Image: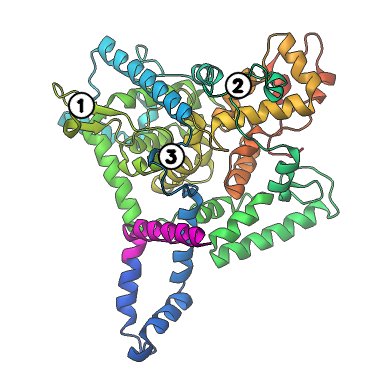
Amino acid sequence: MLQEESDLSLVIAQIVQKLKGSSLYAQLERQAWASLQRPEIKLESLKEDIKEYFKISGWEKKLQNAVYSELSVFPSPSHPAAPPEHLKEPLVYMRKAQGSWEKRILKSLNSMCTELSIPLARKRPVGEQKELLNKWNEMGTDEPDLSLFRPVYAPKDFLEVLINLRNPNYENGDSLSFRTHLGLIQVPLKVKDIPELKEFFVELGLTTGQLGIDDSTQVPPELFENEHVRIGQKVLAEQDSAAAQQYIRQGSPTALRAELWALILNISSQPEDILYYEQLKTNVIQHDLLVDSLIYKDVKLTASNDDYYFVFEDYLYQVLLCFSRDTSVLGHFAYNSASPPKSYIRGKLGLEEYAVFYPPNGVIPFHGFSMYVAPLCFLYHEPSKLYQIFREMYVRFFFRLHSISSHPSGIVSLCLLFETLLQTYLPQLFYHLREIGAQPLRISFKWMVRAFSGYLATDQLLLLWDRILGYNSLEILAGYKNIDSALKKSSGPLMSSEDQIMENWPCYNKK
């Protein structure tokens, strides 16, 4: 009991400290001072009167939403004697594997620098700054020569690392559980089984109404949708993040989705947020980074060739270039198993006082990275709002899809969950794919690492991301339903094409 109270006190202290550095704290302080001029505020009951004023004026709700937002990303409590690195990742072999992977990425990046004789960063000449500023909203029309640039890594490279991941303290040769697990992932992590998934995703039950999913329920679909929209409007009127997160588990009405997501992520377009975005834009104008070319290359290879997203090419450049300069993103490395890469001033290699994070946000883009942003362009058309939403989605969810960790929403656990469910509940399909040399994970990995962006139609993808936000978990990416129907539809070699499987992969649905 005492330990629980101590843990709670520590969590409260850390959240308070975090909020003290936010713009909300300054706003609350200003409101508190301004409220002293109000006639209903009495000196003898000052504290209670100010609390009541905050409650009536809506500031209490804003504070609650901010605390709820911090709790959504707060790392799980650990033993007081545990070293700091355990907050990032408790398993040593996972930390070592992530460290080795980071060295490999940096080696690839440095090799590109050397081969192309291009610096990691340089200040743009004045003429180049003016030119970039003038075409800021038309960067998609620019066609720089990117033929010599290559992605630092692709999802298939990352998958090979995960396949070779092993726990050195675990002998799986004679283990019953691992003798029966014939998938590619060979690490002993605890993942949910079907009963646990049913309990966790209880709102996805077959008898519960869902927007965008054609399941038979006791309520006619049109009546459910009308009532669901009415409730959604009420949730938005209340401006309660927790209520919005619960509501969105059954899907969001298209007209309300942008506001609901912003409420859940605690995003509001305050003047200081717009100013911050403009400062990031200025940094892009003034300095050229090597990762800028990697971003251009990725957009050209992915979103620009996508029938849904090619029209948003300019938005993607703006958001991703600003994202690479945003040092506030570094904060998520406190609970990310990864560490931000460092660069040293020439001649000062190894001296920490001459080290800087590179890129400034600590995130090196890979092939397909821009697809995390593309679907959001359908919801947000104001660049600073779009940027804030993407940044929050990344530091809450997307970073887990390209870092090695034991977290339940980490890509390793998702891969293991996918293989375990498929082998357990659709064994014939699983064994058949293995026999013909088409390991299921090799097909599905690129879908999961992109959170299905680019592989599902946008309306279906947004319904899937509704559930990610609603459950604050990526585990639904490993879900499946009726894949076995592909066996009945296929002719010739079964599952010879990934399109056959995708046709039967409404992953936002439920088992």
Identify the element where label 2 is drawn: loop
Front-most of residues 364 and 506: 364
The alpha-carbon separation of the residues under discs 2 and 3 comes to 22 Å
Secondary structure of the magenta portion, mostly? Answer: helix
Mark 2: amino acid: Gln
Res 186 label: 2
Question: Which residue is at a point 36% across and 56% down the rendered structure image?
Answer: 18
Residue 257: image location, x then y, percent: 58, 51
Question: Which element carries disc 1, helix, strand or loop?
Answer: strand
Which amino acid type is marked by label 1?
Tyr
Indicate whether residue 13 is drawn in magenta: yes
The answer to whether residue 406 is magenta is no
Q: Residues within 10 Å of mark 2 (few under 14, many from 20)?
A: some
Q: Earlier in the sequence, mark 3 or mark 1?
A: 3
Residue 344, numbered label: 1
- CB of mark 3 within 8 Å of CB of mark 1? no
Residues drawn in magenta: 1-26
- Residue extending farthest to the left is 347
